[in-house]
Amino acid sequence: MENIFKLNNINLNYNLNGNNIRVLKNINFEIKKNERVAIIGESGSGKTSLLMLMSGLEKPTTGSIFFQNQDFSKITEDQKTEIRKQKIGLVFQQFYLIPNYTALENVMFPMQINEINDEEEKATSILADFGLGHRTNNLPSELSGGEQQRVAIARAISFNPKVILADEPTGNLDRKNTELVSSLLLDYSKKKKISLVLVTHNSNLAKKCDKVIRLFDGQVKN
Ligand SMILES: Nc1ncnc2c1ncn2[C@@H]1O[C@H](COP(=O)(O)OP(=O)(O)OP(=O)(O)O)[C@@H](O)[C@H]1O
Ligand SMILES: [Mg+2]
């Protein structure tokens, strides 16, 4: 099966006040097309850092990241931005919704920049699926944390990316919405053959994925 991601011997160090901190150590794994992978690990174990590398927003200290067999270190920042725009749906821990856009406009935005048709209809339908049919015209500041999180997820899947990278996509949700959002993410990505990489503390959600990557102190422990 086609490779979406291949990580080769990734190390990530931060220099903090002259101290070298090893955040990720010798990480190797692959994510296949249409594969769902959970990343689990304690707070501070390097999960968000790993997603930042996979999105091309950060660079590893050593090692290589291949996205669809393309080496991130061999392409320009503009090319990486283009890949993110067209092929990677990102759900950050802090959502980063556009503050002066409504929920609907936020979800329409990636479809507009990718020139996808019927964006309003599609965004309306996805928001309804996520239980936000009554919130389409609200600004992010008028939404609860859990509602904003669902808008962020709807936005990440709206434009049919190759992969969704989601950082604790159910972190702010109650049990009912955790169930709803988990099954929507899993079902939708399966239906559209989108790979899914999600960081989660929810062991039920991790179990439903095809593969679990356990990070412990910056290393993969399986
Ligand atoms: N820009 C930075 N400079 C220095 N250290 C950093 C930086 N970003 C992250 N770190 C350190 O890297 C380690 C891993 O952080 P990361 O955010 O990846 O953890 P995490 O597994 O996502 O944790 P959480 O579950 O709390 O979100 C932490 O010890 C953190 O302090
Ligand atoms: Mg994190």
Image (cartoon, rainbow, N blue to C red):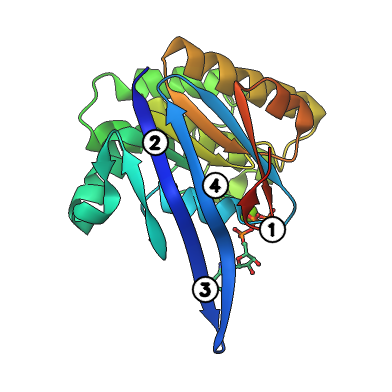
Q: Mark 3 CB in 8 Å range of ligand 1?
A: yes
What distance separates the C-alpha of mark 2 from that of mark 4?
Answer: 32 Å
Towards the viewer: 221 or 46: 221
Towards the viewer: 97 or 140: 97
Seen at 18% across and 56% down, the residue is 76
- Amino acid type at image mark 2: Phe
Q: Residue 179 at what x, y percent from top left?
A: 73, 22
Tell me, yes or no, whether the two marked residues, 3 and 2, touch with CB atoms within 8 Å. Answer: no
Residue underneath mark 3:
14
Q: What is the secondary structure assignment of the residue under circle 3?
A: strand
Q: Identify the disc placed on residue 184.
A: none
What distance separates the C-alpha of mark 1 from that of mark 3?
Answer: 14 Å
Return the disc, 2 or 4, that comes first in the chain's sequence.
2
- Packing grade of label 1 (10 A; few <14, some 14-19, many >=20) is some
Residue underneath mark 4:
140
Q: Residue furthest top?
A: 191
Return the disc, 2 or 1, that comes first in the chain's sequence.
2
Q: What is the secondary structure assignment of the residue under circle 4?
A: helix
Q: Residue 174 at what x, y percent from top left?
A: 79, 34
Q: What is the secondary structure assignment of the residue under circle 1?
A: loop
Seen at 26% across and 34% down, the residue is 112
Camera-nearest label, 2 or 4? 2
Return the disc, 1 or 3, that comes first in the chain's sequence.
3
Residue underneath mark 2:
5
- Amino acid type at image mark 4: Pro
**Quadrant housing residue 62:** bottom left
